[in-house]
Amino acid sequence: MSNANKVVLAYSGGLDTSVILKWLQDTYQSEIVTFTADLGQGEELEPARHKALKAGIKPENIFIDDLREEFVRDFVFPMFRCNAIYEGEYLLGTSIARPLIAKRQIEIARQTGADAVSHGATGKGNDQVRFELGYYALMPNVKVIAPWREWDLLSREKLLAYAEKHGIPVERKHREGGSPYSMDANLLHISYEGRHLENPAAEAEEAMWRWTVSPEQAPDTPEYIDLEFASGDLVAINGQKMKAHELLARLNELGGKHGIGRLDLVENRYVGMKSRGCYETPGGTILLRAHRAIESVTLDREVAHLKDDLLPRYASLIYNGYWWSPERSALQALIDHTQQPVNGWVRLKLYKGNVIVVSRDSKTDSLFDPEVATFEDDQGAYDQKDAHGFIRLNALRMRIAANARAKRER
């Protein structure tokens, strides 16, 4: 174990990172810089400052940054231009937050002259990979300290005992049994793991969900909303233009009200194990449905199919922590190029957990030609006799194979 002169710690002020802060001070004899990111998790972050001060951190070494707009504008929206979904279901709410946290940690390390960074991700999870691939991509020679891979405090009971021994304040919920779940929240989603959910046969408790009502309790009257897109990004809701993070927050409110965006998933983690998680992504679920709807009238068929071919690869890159990789950047450049004509509006009906597209159009970039698509007399816009030739050409190889089989059987 080599020493570190100054360490930038991703710090929430919760039990784990409060213990890590003290452990770093004792184990590495280092000056600590704390960094707390506001990604729209909906919690008061100033207590983290007070806890850091009480732990002896210098005021100038405490960073609490509002990253909500950067998060949605520069990470969430680019990801949604690809319609990225991991394993067909997961909207990557945790995954997409980690590269931004890593980026800001490295910026603070350079600003403060720190030579090391630290995080509270366990050695079992994906986040250790996401954080550390980001660190090394942005500061190749930085020292990374991952306490969960070094210490022996591998249970909640040991963490509590360490906190008590060193006078670290412990919230009442931890003393009385703790939260029944491990949770992560940002503007895109809130996730739940652990405890009750470690049994994949057990149904998630209704009381667990925080952002969404159950579909059964959602309003009996549907709500219609209009979303406007420019170059693939959401720019307005019901005619009202807002900042990126405000748009996503508004979609979360609308989706939560109508019971939209719940997911119960057993996913394949990077480290090889299967893990069950429950997710609430109301705004992201609405955004994904609307984005695909506007693409349906503005994207060329083969471009749309190429995007769908690339989607699993892109989603896996995000899930596995490769946001800062050259291949993700290359894919992003291609995806962003495809989004130039994705301009227009989509009308949605929100009802009882469902997002229903009722209409969509683009004044400038629609490829939908009513004169060609009509089932009525198209006045010669499309010659149906043309279909004969391409059908016979595409059937030729199958006809040859069928004739060959017939010869063999005779």
Image: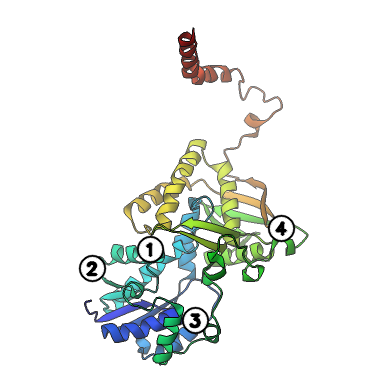
Secondary structure beneath label 4: loop
Instruction: Say whether disc 2 or disc 4 marks the residue closer to the N-terminus.
Output: 2
Q: Nearer the viewer, mark 1 or mark 3?
A: 1
From the viewer's perspective, tell me whether residue 83 is left or right of residue 110: right
- Chain-order first, disc 4 or disc 1: 1
Q: Earlier in the sequence, mark 1 or mark 3?
A: 3
Q: Look at discs 1 and 2 and give the one toward the viewer.
A: 1
Local SS, label 3: loop
Query: Which residue is tagged 3?
Result: 45
Q: Nearer the viewer, residue 371 or 220?
A: 220
**Element type at marker 2?**
loop
In the rendered structure, are the residues bearing label 2 and label 4 in contact, judged by CB atoms less than 8 Å apart? no
Q: Amino acid at mark 1?
A: Arg
The quadrant in which residue 4 appears is bottom left
Circle 1 residue: 130
CA gap, disc 3 to disc 4? Answer: 34 Å
Please indicate whether residue 366 sits to the left or right of residue 164 in the image.
Answer: right
**What's the CA distance linking mark 4 and mark 1?**
35 Å
- Tag 2: residue type? Asn
Residue 239: quarter of image: bottom right
State the separation of the CA atoms marked 1 and 2.
17 Å
The residue lying toward the viewer, choosing from 44 and 267, is 267
Earlier sequence position, callout 3 versus callout 2: 3
Residue drawn 54% across and 20% down? 391
Residue drawn at (29%, 65%) of the image: 136
Q: Earlier in the sequence, mark 1 or mark 2?
A: 1
The residue wearing badge 4 is 352
Q: CA distance from mark 2 to mark 4?
A: 51 Å
Tell me the kind of residue under disc 3. Answer: Leu
Q: Is any atom of residue 230 visible in this view?
A: yes
